Amino acid sequence: MECMAAPRTFACDRLEVRIYPNREEAGAAGAAVAAGIIRESMVRDGRVAVVLASAVSQDPFLASLRAQKGIDWPRVTAFHLDEYAGMSATHPASFRRFQHERLIDHVPIGTFHELEGDAADLGAECTRYAALLRDARPNLVALGIGENGHLAFIDPPVCDFQDPLDVRQVELDEICRRQQVHDGAFARVEDVPTRALSLTVPFFLRVPRALVFVNGANKAAAVKAAVEGPISEQCPASALRRHPAPTLFLDPAAASRLAL
């Protein structure tokens, strides 16, 4: 049995920051925390709903989560954060497909609600998904932070900390679209869709627990802005410092620009 090194930890406002020796240990630690939240919610409520991010930064977390013991998966309802507009669930870059490949097809989960980016009426799809979220009342959201500081697909140009909607249509900015190429989802930025459906920042702030996973030097500037910069719509992830119970899991590269 491998032992993980104790993380370096500190807090900024309400945000707990944990720095681990590598992305695998950060993901495994977060999965253990998530499993505890899920088990506690099962005991208290008999059910649990979770919202999951779909990005390569989530791979260690999801791989470890599906291996956790004591999770009654048939009583878990899962959602995801976002999906490209016009994209089918079978497309290699689909976030619905991502969740199936990393988690849903590996565990006997009760329900996985898919945000249908290829719905005929995207406005109606946002309303439908928001109603499902409202009924399920998720206990936990897993997030990443984009190179431009985004949460889900809420990029700085479309960020509104007072957004009245829980799910909306958004335009993707150039940095966000280039990140999708960096992550290997597309070969060229020209191939990346320009629009998406996304859950919003006010929704994330209402979920009782938030676990955030970030790794790699390309995210270091965004992490610094989120943790040490002003709480501003210019860095959507800075809103995490207002969340009631957020934890940020970093590898050394993502933490490399923090003033430790």
Image (cartoon, helix red, strand yellow):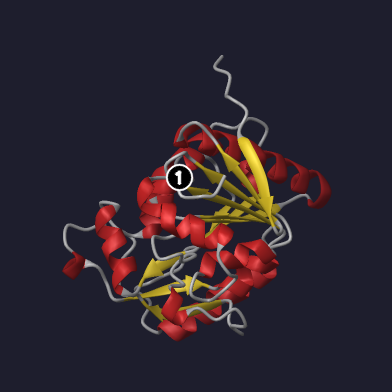
Q: Residues within 10 Å of mark 1 (few under 14, many from 20)?
A: some
Q: Residue at x 31, y 60 (%)?
A: 179
Residue 48, above or below 207:
above
Left or right relative to 143: residue 221: left
Residue at the right extreme, as displayed: 44
Instruction: Let me know if residue 72 appears in the view.
Output: no
x then y, percent, for residue 250? 51, 43
x then y, percent, for residue 171? 36, 80
Q: Nearer the viewer, residue 252 or 243?
A: 252
Instruction: Let me know if residue 173 appears in the view.
Output: yes
x then y, percent, for residue 118? 34, 73
Q: Residue at x 45, y 75 (%)?
A: 156
Which residue is under mark 1?
Answer: 256
x then y, percent, for residue 183? 30, 52
Q: Residue at x 17, y 57 (%)?
A: 187
Q: Secondary structure at mark 1?
A: loop
Left or right relative to 71: residue 42: right
Residue at the top extreme, as displayed: 1
As shown in the figure, which amino acid type bears the numbered disc 1?
Answer: Ser
Residue 89, above or below 86:
above
The quarter of the displayed image where residue 180 is located: bottom left
Q: Nearer the viewer, residue 135 or 164?
A: 164
The N terminus is located in which quarter? top right
Residue 207, above or below 164:
above
The quarter of the displayed image where residue 182 is located: bottom left
Q: Residue at x 36, y 82 (%)?
A: 120
The C terminus is located in which quarter? top right
Count of numbered labels shown in the rendering: 1
